[in-house]
Every structure is written in structure tokens, then in C-alpha cells.
Image: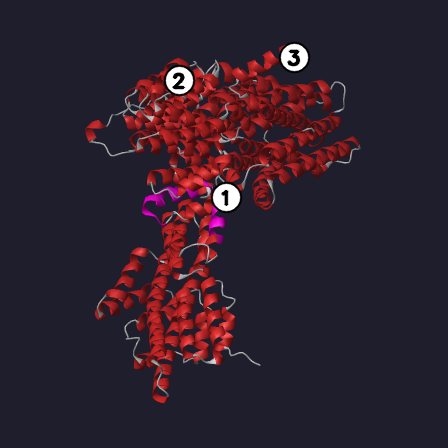
């Protein structure tokens, strides 16, 4: 028995491209989705038959409308809950809530407690249950696997959903022979309850160990509105339209199917059995078409013509129904719709999206699946309410509406195909590097498969690279031989990316030709080759790597180490099997025996990459040491390796390398690699004045800019309120760039206006302090002349305040650049600061014309003040600024977020040496900056005389 199980295990691992250490969690996830879909296929026919038996098909249109409203409205509250609670809590509550709901529905139906409009509750519930559970399952699955693993295992896991679709319906059909229909809900509840321990086990063993950076990297990115993204892309808009029309027609077909079934089959249990049988049969037919026909149809007819199969089949069925209004005809239409939609139509639609960037596809998928589907469902409901309920037209004649909609569907498919060709040509023309016109090749775009193969066979290097990146997303065996031919391509980039593609394809085992590429001069090619061999080598893999890790050629040994580390990431079992830590230790010991500096650098870089890739904590100190290396190449590799660990302990070390010109780019990329959770950490570091140098803090703002997300914008807004000028001005500048480059990012106009008004008040306040200091200086000199040191300290403070006026003016205009186009605002500031008097006057006049009333009232006086000589007491009097006492001046300045200014005030107080300022010094003892606190303590100690 054990031998048989072992053989089955070996077969599953080989046939489905799985690794032994991931088999358990993969099978559990497959079982989980199997149970979810099985439950759905029990509940859906059960509720449908109970609903139709009680209310008849005339109630379905309102059901469609209510489902659409609940799906769209509920998604808002669901998204809010997802942000507020952990995913495992949401999943737990969904399963437990669903089990309780099923039991309550079962009790209600058993005791005839449901009638009339109450039946809409379970009907809408079923639709939402299918959306929620499937969505939550795939979100969790994405957390369990990284992107590379997901590409391999998701097909196998998805087979569980297909099996559930087949098993659930047939089980329902069989159970109706021994159980009443309403009792099936208790069976569904019991099966669904089995999902609870599975999800809890998966969460506790696989997800809970992930840190926030890993979770962020495996989650669907949030960003620009999906609707806006779809609207901006003609191809995406047409895809959404075609999907929407197909759903609308599917709902009309579903109505006809339900209506005919409920009229021809009067018995409730028989109706449940009928629905269950055909739900599963549709899954079987869809699976058979997917396995044996889809690739041939799409490959032979191309994407555009493949999209015609579904509408053509429904069109034939609809015409036939008008001639022969029989149940079998409606069943035929339902088979065409259900089977072709999930096979040929789905495959063709997925291929259509090849020219669309993967990040945009991720962001718009949920919108298309939920919102577009719900809108189409609602529209179908309204159409049926008008024609069936209001005009009392027989359901047979819905076929006429379907025929009209199919003509619209075909129209958009035609335009979709044309736009796809345009987008595909645009994809081929995107230059990665500048090339001469003579180097460009015109690739004829015909069917998708032929075009991709043609590009791979005869395109330019740049076109091939673009296409290899796209085929990496699709993972289609039909491209295997064209990609295989690229193993001998002259470009190392192409060879490396070709191996990366072949890693996910299984048409042939290419270990023999790829093993030859281990001797390639390019380390990236060699590393990719080692990764392929580690996955596909059918002999002793450990011995293979032992051979290459011990060769004299350091390039090969380094590539073997890096390739091994990449494949063993997050896998302690395999790391132990391959003795990865010992291999790294051995590589480190070899460093001392290398005489060439270049060889030492290359070996060190390979070791650092291996530690970072495999996240070997034992050697994290090696990364920390080399981040500080004077060799910029080694330092940059260490920085990148540190980011690959996704360990927070490296963040401070990476931030410290931001100011360096040679390490800035890699440091920004490294911090960006941590994902959005790093924004909060960086924000806290910036706020702690003693933690970062000013230059480091200013560059941190550029890291936030790279995310170009709403979270980054919100954090930058906070930095404009709570930080010193250098950071503040950089944050404002970044906000300005983000506002005009990414219009979807929200920067509230009210915030901008408030900040401008605050800065204007601060400007006026600074003028008051300057004016007051000039008066104080004059009075002191007229009574008892100031000491030279006190006079110098006061003059230094006044000079510093005058410089701060320029800074404040700069911030005001930077903020204006967020509200108004920068090309209008920037020249005004330049003219005011550096122009001649006439240019300044014209600039202020122009500013007066573009500002709204609220800003004009505060900002124009500030702008006009620049025309006067601030150092003159007479000019300051003309500005009608408030005169402050000396104590008020220092109190105000010590509260400002300006360390240099606070130091200048403390220095002046020290030179004045009067006890009346001791209360200000005591206030400074609580300053956020350690040096300010220390200085205040020193002055207090020297001014306060001990009492006896």
C-alpha cells in the first residue's frame, strides 16, 4: 500500500510540476476549493428550484436586479472590512456565517417559513456566496505562494474547482432521490464546515509567518481607479464591453432556461435534480472542450474568430428556439453558453489581454469580474421586467432580444479585434533601447499564436525581449519550440529570458541543451540555466551542484550558488538537503585565497546575492558588513541583497546609504522592493529628528515618490506639516510632481489652500519677529549698548529670519504649484526672487489674476512685501506688522520646527544672560532634538545660581 501511495505521489509531482515540500499545502488548497465549489453546486440548484417552485420564473428579473445592487453595494463594505480586519478573520466569519445561513435556510424551508419576497434573501445570498468565497480563496492562495510558485501550482489547484463543479451537481442530482430538496442545504453546510479547519491550518502554517513586506508583495496592488484605467485604454474598454454584453446575454439565456425548466418540470425534487445534473454536465463539457479543442480552435482560427464561436452558437440556438420552443433547445443554448464561455471564449479573451501590462490587468480584473458582471446582470433584470413582467411577452421571444444583442456583440468583437492588432503592433514598436530606423522590422499581425511565434522567430532583439516578457505571463505550451530555438540566440538577455520561459513549460525536458549553457560567458544565462536544472534534472541534483560549485571557473561556481539560492528561497527543507549554509560558508572561506580583486568582488557579490535570495539569517551580518564596503559594486549588491530578505533590520542601514551618489539608486530601489509597508517605517524615521541626518531624510521622500500611491501621497501630506524646511520643501515638490503626473491620486484642494494660508501667516509672523528684533536692537543700543557678542547673536538671528522668509515664500509657491499648473506658478516665483523691480511688479499682477479671492487676500500682501527692503525699519512699519515683545519672539521661534533657528534663539538668550528667559529654557528641555535639549540645559546651569 505504501509503495502504491509512493508511486502516486511521484506521478503527481512529475505530472503537475509540483515540489515534494509544497505537496501537502497544495493538496489542502485544492481540497478547499473543491469543497467550496461543491457546496455552491449543491446550494445553487437547490435554491433555484425552491425559488422557482414558489414564485415562478416571473420573479427572476427582480432577483437579477437585487443581486446586482447587493454585489456592487456590498463590495464597498467588503473592501472596508478587508482594510479593517485580517484576512483570516474575514474568511473565518464568512465560512461560519455561511454555514449558519445554510442551516437557517434549511430550517426555514423545512418548516415552510419562507414565502413571497423572503425567498429573494436566499436567492441573492447564493450569488454573493459564490463571489465572496472564491475571491477569498484566491487571495489566500496568493499569500501562500510567491509569483513563481503560483505559476506552477495554480493550474493544479484550479483542477479542484473543476472537479467540485462536476461532483457537486451530480451529487445534488443523486441526493434528491433519497432526500427532500430543502435537506440538501444541511449537507452543504456540513461540507462547507470542513473548509474551516483547512483554512485555519493553511493560515497558521503558511501565512502567519509572513511579515508585512511579504504580504504586500503577494497582494493585488491598489492604485488608480480600475474604471479610470479601463477608460484610458481602448482595448480594455472594448474587452469590458464584450464581457458585459456576454454576461447580459447569458442572464437572458439563464432566464429562458429557468423558465422552460420550471414549466416543463413541476416536481420540486425533480427540478433540483435537473438543475444539479446539467450544472455538472456543463462543467464536464467545458472541461472536455478545454482539454481537447480550445487550443486547436484558438490556434487555428485566431483570437478574433475564436470569439465568434460563443455568439454564433447562441444565435443558432435562439433562432432554433423561435422555430421549436422546446426544453431541449433551451438546454442546447445553455450548453453552448456555459461550455464555450469557460473554454474557448475565456482562452481567447485572456490572449487578447497580452498587450496590456500585467499590473493593469491585476488592478482591473476584479472590477471586470464583479462590477461589469453585476451591471450586466442588473441590466438583464430591467430588460426582463419591462418585456416579460410589464408587456407579458412569452419567454420564447426573449430570443429576439438576444439576437439583437448578439449583433451588437459581434460589432464590438470586430472592433476589439482591430484594436487588439493596433495594441499588439504598439507592443512590438516599444523601444527598450534606441535603434536605427533600418533595424526595425515590420511584423504582420494575424492570429495571436502565429504572430507571437513569428516575432520570436524573426523579430528584432528588442521585439523578442518584449514578447518573451509577455509569454512569461501566459505560460502557453504552443510557444515552446519557438522559445527553445532562442537558446542559441546571440543576445545573452534573450537566452536568459528564454530559459526563464522554458522553466514553466513542460513539452520537453531540455536539461541536455541547457546544461551546455552553464558554460555561457554571461552569468545571468548561467544562473537561469542552473535554476532550470534544479527543477527538471531527473538524476542526483545534489551531485550535479556539487560538481559545478567546486569547479575552478569562478563564474560557473558563482552562478551555481546564485541559481541554487534563488530556487531554495523560503524553503528550509531544500536548503538543508542541499547544505546551502555550508556552501556559503565554504564560499566565504575561499575569498581569502583569491588573489585577483575582480575575482574577490565577483565572489563576494555572488555570496551576498545567495544570502539575500535564500534569506539565510545566519549570514545576515555578512550583508551588514558589506553594505558599508568602500567598493561601490559590492555595497550596491549588499544593499540589493538586504532588500531581498525583506527584513526590517536592514532598513536603517539602507537609508544611511541614500545620500551617496553611487549607492542612491540601488538604495531607493531596495527600499521600494520592501513594498508599501515601508512608507510607515520611513515616516516614523523622518519624524525622529535624531534618527536620520537631514540629507537622508530628504532623500527618503524620493523613495515615497516611487510608490506613486495614495498612501504615499497621504504620508507626504503629513510630512509637509510636521518636518523641517529641507524635508518639507522636498515633500511639497514630490506632491506637485505626483499631482500632475498621476491625476488619479487625490490631493485635496482644501489642504493646499490651508497650507498656503498657514505659510502666509508664518511669513507675516516672521516679518513681525524681524521688525520686533530691529526695534529691540535699537532700544537696547539707545539705553545700555549691547555687548558685541549679544549684538552679533541678534544680527545673526535677524539674518537667519530673513533667509527663512525666502524659504517660506518658496514653500508658498511650491504649494501653489499643486493647485495651479506649475508652468504658470514657477516663473512667478523666479521673477519675485531674482527679477528686477519691474519684472516683480508684473509677476505680482499675473499672480493677482490667477488666484481665487481667499488666496488673493493673504498672498498678494506677502508677494508685495518682497518689493521692499526687509532690513529697513521704515519699510517694515509700512507693512503694518505686529510688534512683539522680546519674550514673545523667542517663545514663538522656539516652537518652530527649525533646529537651526532654535539654536540661534538659545545662543542669543545665552548672550543676553537674563533670568526672565529661564522659563523658555526649561521649555526647551523637552525639545524633540537632543542637541537642543543639551544646549538649553547648559545655559540653564550657567544662569541659575545655587541657593543656600
Badge 3: residue crowd in 10 Å (few <14, some 14–19, many ≥20): few
**Of pointers 3 and 2, the one earlier in the residue sequence:** 3
Q: Main secondary structure of the magenta part?
A: helix
Q: Which mark is residue 480?
A: 2
Disc 1 from disc 2: Cα separation: 41 Å
Element assignment for label 1? helix
On the question of residue 776 being in view, the answer is yes
Instruction: Where is residue 381? Give x, y as percent.
Output: 57, 35
**Of pointers 1 and 2, the one earlier in the residue sequence:** 2
Residue named by callout 1: 648
Disc 3 from disc 2: Cα separation: 37 Å
Instruction: Where is residue 308? Give x, y as percent.
Output: 44, 22
Instruction: Where is residue 330? Give x, y as percent.
Output: 58, 21
Q: For the residues carrying marks 1 and 2, which lies nearer the camera in this image?
A: 1
Q: Which mark is residue 2?
A: 3
Q: Quadrant of the C terminus?
A: bottom right
Q: For the residues carrying marks 3 and 2, which lies nearer the camera in this image?
A: 3
- Mark 3–mark 2 contact, CB under 8 Å? no
Disc 1 from disc 3: Cα separation: 45 Å
Stretch of the chain drawn in magenta? 659-684
Badge 2: residue crowd in 10 Å (few <14, some 14–19, many ≥20): many
Q: Is residue 801 above or below residue 512?
A: below
Element assignment for label 2? helix
Q: Quadrant of residue 382?
A: top right
In this image, 863 relative to 361: left or right? left
Instruction: Count up the numbered dots.
Output: 3
Badge 1: residue crowd in 10 Å (few <14, some 14–19, many ≥20): some
What residue is rendered at 67% in x and 37% in y?
120
Q: Quadrant of residue 370?
A: top right
Amino acid at each position: 500500500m505504501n509503495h502504491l501511495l509512493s508511486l502516486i505521489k511521484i506521478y503527481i509531482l512529475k505530472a503537475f510540476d509540483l515540489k515534494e515540500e509544497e505537496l501537502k499545502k497544495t493538496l489542502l488548497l485544492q481540497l478547499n476549493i473543491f469543497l467550496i465549489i461543491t457546496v455552491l453546486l449543491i446550494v445553487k440548484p437547490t435554491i433555484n428550484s425552491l425559488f422557482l417552485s414558489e414564485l415562478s420564473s416571473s420573479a427572476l428579473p427582480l432577483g437579477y436586479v437585487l443581486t446586482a445592487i447587493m454585489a456592487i453595494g456590498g463590495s464597498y463594505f467588503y473592501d472596508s472590512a478587508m482594510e479593517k480586519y485580517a484576512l483570516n478573520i474575514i474568511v473565518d466569519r464568512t465560512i461560519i456565517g455561511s454555514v449558519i445561513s445554510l442551516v437557517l435556510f434549511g430550517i426555514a424551508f423545512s418548516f415552510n417559513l419562507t414565502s413571497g419576497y423572503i425567498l429573494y434573501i436566499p436567492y441573492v445570498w447564493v450569488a454573493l456566496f459564490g463571489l465572496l468565497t472564491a475571491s477569498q480563496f484566491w487571495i489566500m492562495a496568493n499569500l501562500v505562494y510567491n509569483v513563481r510558485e503560483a505559476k506552477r501550482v495554480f493550474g493544479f489547484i484550479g483542477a479542484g474547482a473543476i472537479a467540485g463543479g462536476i461532483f457537486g451537481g451530480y451529487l445534488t442530482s443523486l441526493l434528491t432521490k433519497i432526500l427532500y430538496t430543502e435537506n440538501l442545504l444541511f449537507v452543504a453546510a456540513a461540507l462547507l464546515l470542513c473548509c474551516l479547519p483547512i483554512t485555519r491550518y493553511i493560515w497558521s502554517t503558511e501565512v502567519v509567518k509572513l511579515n508585512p513586506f511579504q504580504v504586500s508583495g503577494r497582494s493585488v496592488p491598489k492604485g488608480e481607479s480600475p474604471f479610470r484605467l479601463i477608460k484610458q485604454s481602448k482595448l480594455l474598454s472594448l474587452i469590458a464591453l464584450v464581457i458585459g454584453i456576454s454576461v447580459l446575454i447569458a442572464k437572458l439565456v439563464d432566464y429562458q432556461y429557468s423558465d422552460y425548466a420550471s414549466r416543463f418540470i413541476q416536481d420540486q425534487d425533480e427540478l433540483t435534480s435537473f438543475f444539479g445534473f446539467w450544472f455538472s454536465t456543463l462543467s464536464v463539457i467545458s472541461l472536455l472542450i478545454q482539454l481537447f479543442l480550445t487550443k486547436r480552435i484558438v490556434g487555428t482560427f485566431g483570437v478574433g474568430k475564436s470569439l465568434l464561436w460563443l455568439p454564433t452558437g447562441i444565435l443558432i440556438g435562439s433562432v432554433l428556439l423561435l422555430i421549436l420552443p422546446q426544453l431541449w433547445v433551451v438546454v442546447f443554448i445553455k450548453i453552448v453558453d456555459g461550455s464555450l464561455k469557460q473554454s474557448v471564449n475565456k482562452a481567447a479573451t485572456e490572449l487578447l489581454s497580452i498587450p496590456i501590462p500585467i499590473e493593469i490587468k491585476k488592478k482591473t480584473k476584479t472590477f471586470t469580474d464583479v462590477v461589469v458582471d453585476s451591471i450586466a446582470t442588473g441590466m438583464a433584470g430591467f430588460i426582463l421586467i419591462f418585456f416579460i413582467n410589464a408587456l407579458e411577452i412569452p419567454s420564447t421571444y426573449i430570443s429576439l432580444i438576444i439576437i439583437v444583442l448578439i449583433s451588437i456583440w459581434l460589432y464590438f468583437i470586430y472592433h476589439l479585434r482591430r484594436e487588439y492588432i493596433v495594441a499588439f503592433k504598439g507592443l512590438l514598436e516599444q523601444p527598450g533601447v534606441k535603434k536605427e530606423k533600418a533595424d526595425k522590422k515590420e511584423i504582420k499581425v494575424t492570429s495571436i499564436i502565429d504572430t507571437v511565434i513569428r516575432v520570436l522567430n524573426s523579430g528584432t532583439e528588442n521585439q523578442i525581449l518584449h514578447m518573451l516578457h509577455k509569454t512569461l505571463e501566459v505560460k502557453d505550451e504552443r510557444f515552446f519550440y519557438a522559445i527553445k530555438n532562442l537558446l542559441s540566440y546571440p543576445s545573452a538577455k534573450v537566452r536568459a529570458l528564454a530559459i526563464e520561459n522554458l522553466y514553466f513549460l513542460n513539452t520537453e525536458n531540455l536539461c541536455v541543451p541547457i546544461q551546455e549553457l552553464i558554460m555561457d560567458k554571461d552569468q545571468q544565462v548561467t544562473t537561469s540555466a542552473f535554476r532550470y536544472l534544479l527543477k527538471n534534472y531527473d538524476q542526483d541534483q545534489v551531485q550535479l551542484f556539487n560538481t559545478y560549485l567546486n569547479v575552478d571557473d569562478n563564474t560557473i561556481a558563482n552562478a551555481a550558488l546564485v541559481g541554487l539560492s534563488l530556487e531554495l528561497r523560503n524553503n528550509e527543507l531544500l536548503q538543508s538537503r542541499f547544505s546551502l549554509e555550508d556552501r556559503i560558508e565554504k564560499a566565504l572561506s575561499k575569498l581569502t585565497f583569491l588573489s585577483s580583486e575582480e575575482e574577490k568582488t565577483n565572489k563576494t557579490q555572488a555570496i551576498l546575492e545567495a544570502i539575500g535570495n535564500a534569506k539565510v539569517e545566519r549570514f545576515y551580518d555578512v550583508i551588514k558588513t558589506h553594505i558599508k564596503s568602500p567598493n561601490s559594486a559590492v555595497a550596491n549588491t549588499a544593499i540589493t541583497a538586504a532588500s531581498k530578505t525583506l527584513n526590517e533590520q536592514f532598513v536603517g542601514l539602507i537609508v544611511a546609504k541614500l545620500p551617496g551618489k553611487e549607492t542612491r539608486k540601488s538604495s531607493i530601489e531596495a527600499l521600494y522592493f520592501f513594498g508599501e509597508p515601508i512608507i510607515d517605517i520611513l515616516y516614523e524615521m523622518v519624524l525622529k529628528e535624531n534618527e536620520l541626518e537631514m540629507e537622508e531624510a530628504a532623500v527618503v521622500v524620493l523613495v515615497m515618490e516611487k510608490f506613486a500611491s495614495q498612501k504615499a501621497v497621504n504620508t507626504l501630506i503629513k510630512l509637509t506639516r510636521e518636518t523641517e524646511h529641507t524635508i518639507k520643501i522636498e515633500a511639497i515638490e514630490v506632491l506637485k510632481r505626483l499631482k500632475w503626473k498621476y491625476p488619479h491620486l487625490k490631493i485635496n484642494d482644501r489642504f493646499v489652500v490651508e497650507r498656503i494660508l498657514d505659510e502666509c501667516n508664518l511669513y507675516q509672523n516672521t516679518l513681525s519677529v524681524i521688525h520686533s528684533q530691529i526695534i529691540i536692537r535699537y532700544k537696547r543700543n539707545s539705553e545700555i549698548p549691547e555687548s558685541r557678542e549679544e549684538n552679533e547673536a541678534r544680527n545673526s538671528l535677524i539674518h537667519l529670519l530673513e533667509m527663512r522668509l525666502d524659504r517660506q515664500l518658496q514653500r508658498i509657491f511650491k504649494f501653489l504649484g499643486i493647485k495651479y499648473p506649475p508652468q504658470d506658478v514657477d516663473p512667478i516665483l523666479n521673477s519675485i526672487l531674482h527679477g528686477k523691480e519691474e519684472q516683480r511688479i508684473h509677476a505680482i499682477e499675473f499672480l493677482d489674476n490667477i488666484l481665487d479671492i481667499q488666496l488673493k487676500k493673504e498672498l498678494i500682501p506677502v508677494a508685495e512685501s518682497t518689493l521692499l527692503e526687509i532690513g529697513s525699519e521704515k519699510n517694515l512699519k509700512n507693512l503694518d506688522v505686529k510688534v512683539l515683545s522680546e519674550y514673545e519672539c523667542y517663545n514663538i521661534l522656539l516652537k518652530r520646527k527649525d533646529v537651526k533657528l532654535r539654536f540661534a534663539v538659545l545662543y542669543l538668550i545665552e548672550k543676553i544672560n537674563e533670568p526672565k528667559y529661564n522659563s523658555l529654557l526649561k521649555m526647551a528641555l523637552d525639545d524633540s532634538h537632543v542637541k537642543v535639549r543639551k544646549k538649553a540645559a547648559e545655559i540653564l546651569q550657567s544662569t541659575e545660581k545655587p541657593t543656600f
